[in-house]
Image: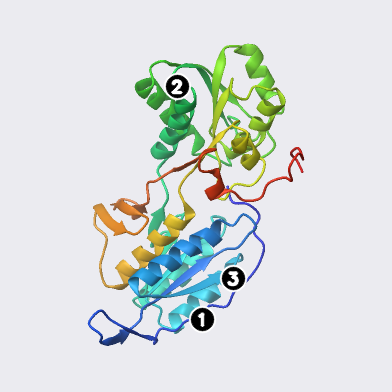
Amino acid sequence: MRRTIALMIVPAVVAAGVLAAGSSGARQTQRTIGLITQTGADGFFNKFETGGKSAATALGDHLAITRVSDTPTQISTIKSLVAQHAAAIAIHPDPATVKQVLPALARARAHGIATLSYELRSPGSVWVNQASSTQVAQALADALASQMNQRGQFVIVSCLRSAGAYPIVGTRLKLTKAYIQRRYPQMQRVGVAYGDLGNGDVDTHLFNRLMRAHPQMRGLIFLCPGEAYNQPPLLVQAHKVGQVFTAGNGGDCPPLDDPYLTSVRLGAEEIVCEGDPAKLGYLTVWAADYLARGHRFAPGSYDVGGPVGTVRYFSHNRELRLGQPLTITKANLAQYAGQSCPPATPWPC
């Protein structure tokens, strides 16, 4: 779930003709990779850019970063990169306006420039994705099972049945049910509950209703970011931390801000993110460099190296999958923490 994004444009310094020394000492043209990102208070793209810069340094590429949040500027940036002979362009498309960007990306490919999209798919471009629904569902289940010692009653909390804003949740619900039944036979699912609006305001009485209905309940899985956001603070207020455990979908994370941050710090929740944005940034630039060198992806595994390791490519949807969901716990929280409330200040602060 993308948080609100403020408009901010950072001019990209594109230098397709910059020269760099190769391993043999000879001078060669440095490839320019155009990276079009967005900016916002959550810091996701800061970490993404850090990973991209690390890959560019390792590969000897020039990384031209443009931060922007509106579609017209995305289009003008693509045109500018084409005019300056970039070797590849990677973009985070807006799902509401992606069709408006497609002609500009097609023109880039017509000029021999490789195009990629990351996080969200863009037809015609290689899609650098974080994780599959199966991987996210299993990560949520594993996070809860580890806290419950793989035994006891639990409930899966989904979005409202009619909520269309998060349609993939139906798939994840089926996958989570099947995986836990197979992998953790001593965990007993005693119900499936539904929040109000999924990605919006959830039912503030949901947690108490579930506790009354299932007094022996020891675990909750929140498939949607809205429930993962609002329910664990109610668990804290009910003084059930350490008795009831939760694992929640953190949406577009890390970094974690409140109330996710405080919920994890207090032991009321473990948060599952689809991946580490720094690794996603590294993989995106690595893939852009790979295509810029004239290679093409074929189905199978690729050793990216660096912090990423091995990834897989799926030809049916042109997906290069990072495949490494990230679970944030009390043990690793400091590494992924964002903004929190001042000490002794309850949420919301």
What residue appears at the point 28 percent right and 73 percent down from the top-left corner? 293
Question: Residue 136, position in %: x, y?
Answer: 44, 38
Report whether 150 appears left or right of 237.
left
The residue indicated by pointer 2 is: 149
Residue 161 versus residue 57 in the image, above or below: above
Residue 293 versus residue 116 in the image, above or below: below
- Please name which of the two marks, 1 or 2, marks the residue nearer to the observer: 2
Residue 135 versus residue 116 in the image, above or below: above
Mark 3 in CB contact with mark 2 (< 8 angstroms)? no
In front of the other: 327 or 170: 327
Quarter assignment of residue 240: top right
In front of the other: 265 or 258: 265
- Residue 262 visible in rendering: yes
The residue indicated by pointer 1 is: 13
Mark 2 residue element: loop
What residue appears at the point 57 percent right and 33 percent down from the top-left corner? 269
Which quadrant does the C terminus fall into?
top right
| Real-space CA distance between mark 3 and mark 1, rounded to the nearest whole angstrom | 19 Å
Residue 252: mark: none
The amino acid pointed to by label 2 is Asn
* Mark 3: few/some/many CA within 10 Å (<14, 14-19, 20+): few
The residue indicated by pointer 3 is: 72
